Amino acid sequence: MENHKIIGERLHSWATDLWPINRSLTGAGIRKTLDYLGDLLPGLTVHEVPSGTLAYDWTVPAEWSIRDAYIADEEGNRVIDFQKNNLHVIGYSDPVDQWMELGELDKHLYSLPDQPTAIPYITSYYARRWGFCLSYNQRQTLKSGRYHVVIDSELKSGVLNYAELILRGETSEEVFLSTYVCHPSMANNELSGPVVTTGLAQWLQGLEKRRYTYRIVFIPETIGSIVYLSKNFEHLKRHVIAGFNITCIGDDRCYSYLPSRSGNSLSDLVAQHVLQNTDPDFKRYTWLDRGSDERQYCAPGVDLPIATIMRSKYSEYPEYHTSLDDLNLVTPAGLEGGFTALRRAIEIIEQNAYLNIKVLCEPQLGKRGLYPTLSTKDSGDQVRAMMDMISYCDGTRTLLEIASLIEEPFWELLPVVEKLVEYGLLERKYVVF
């Protein structure tokens, strides 16, 4: 396995490259982002869906593009400049080019008095308006007078883009990984998801074999998942046995878990096992705390087995949807931790199997060199864990069930299972869905 520190630094470097791109639900920013990810992921296919396309109760919106935006004072100085921070403009703002007094302009300005240094992130996808976002401190410096207000944007019929990567496995059952690529320059609530998902996809591509097929999608949030479901629903219902919505996975403050609507899918069981053995103090949320694409994947009648493993959950950390959610908040160590948690979850899904010991009574392990040769407290714990595991190997329980029963990490028991299978002491029967 590649050095963990190197993995985190690579993911952070990708996030740094993607940071300046102005992304939205549609437009050039998403296409540029997907092109970048496509260079990292051979086989990634970009799709387009025309504006006006119906997807269940929704309609694909018009495509929005923006070339420039600013507010200039009477001397021509740009006091707010989209080129310096793309959060300065409300997403999907209508074009404007006019002079106005500060009193009139103020109706179109948005800031956060409780976070005076933060630029808020605001969108208006489905209502026509324009506006600028700025820090409260900067807003307080605006002087009375006339300002030249310019938003050089365009809203017209175009396309919604998303990308898909399908990695074939030995079976047609699928694990579904979904992340979104529609937010501008924010790090935990955006870039952490796509870069960790890309890292997972590269790792999956490098496996010698895969039991399951992996369906990995990069979409605009909400409308993207609805569109994707409208095109693939029947296939997903027949084939997806587990999956994760990947978002907010890059800071290093905590781990979090959001269940599927059922709360008892394979994804839920795996996520809880991983986090219990990664950070026993991880934060548990309920379905009532939902807020991302799990709303669509687990909607009544859809009911895909999609859970969410996160670091600091969206809406629950103070920098959320502001300019403070930056590349200092998201760290290489935080990204590596999120990547490792999801990789372990996928490994459990891949390797979970029913286990049956093939001898009566306890097997004689010493003659096979399966006992530690040095007696220490740690070696004693290892032997105890091995014997506890064997005591449950009656063919009726999976390794995941046994690991949870004896409170040992799945990934630490797996090498023991491999040895016991190698010596013909244990029979492994993979789960069939």
Image (spheres, rainbow, N blue to C red):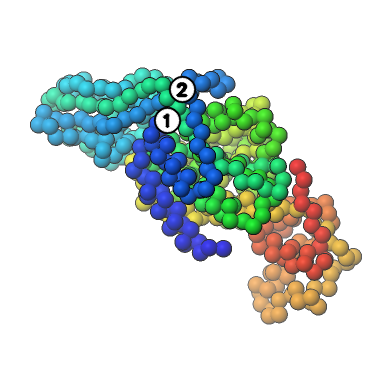
Rendered view: 5 above or below 285: below
Question: For mark 2, what is the residue?
Answer: 51
SS state under label 1: loop
Q: Quadrant of residue 321?
A: top left
SS state under label 2: loop
Disc 2 or 1, which lies upstream in sequence? 1
Side of 68 relative to 160 (left or right): left
Quarter of the picture containing the C terminus is top right
Residue found at x 17% / y 34% = 78
Q: Farthest residue in the bottom direction?
A: 374
Circle on res. 26: 1
Residue 427 location (% of width, % of height): 82, 59
- Disc 1 residue type (three-letter): Thr
Q: Farthest residue in the left direction?
A: 75
In contact (CB < 8 Å): disc 2 and disc 1 = yes
Inter-mark Cα distance, 2 to 1 = 10 Å
Side of 158 relative to 66 (left or right): right
Residue 191 location (% of width, % of height): 43, 44
- Disc 2 residue type (three-letter): Ser
Residue found at x 83% / y 54% = 395
Crowding near the residue tagged with mark 2, few <14, some 14–19, many ≥20 C-alpha atoms within 10 Å: some
Q: Quadrant of residue 147?
A: top left
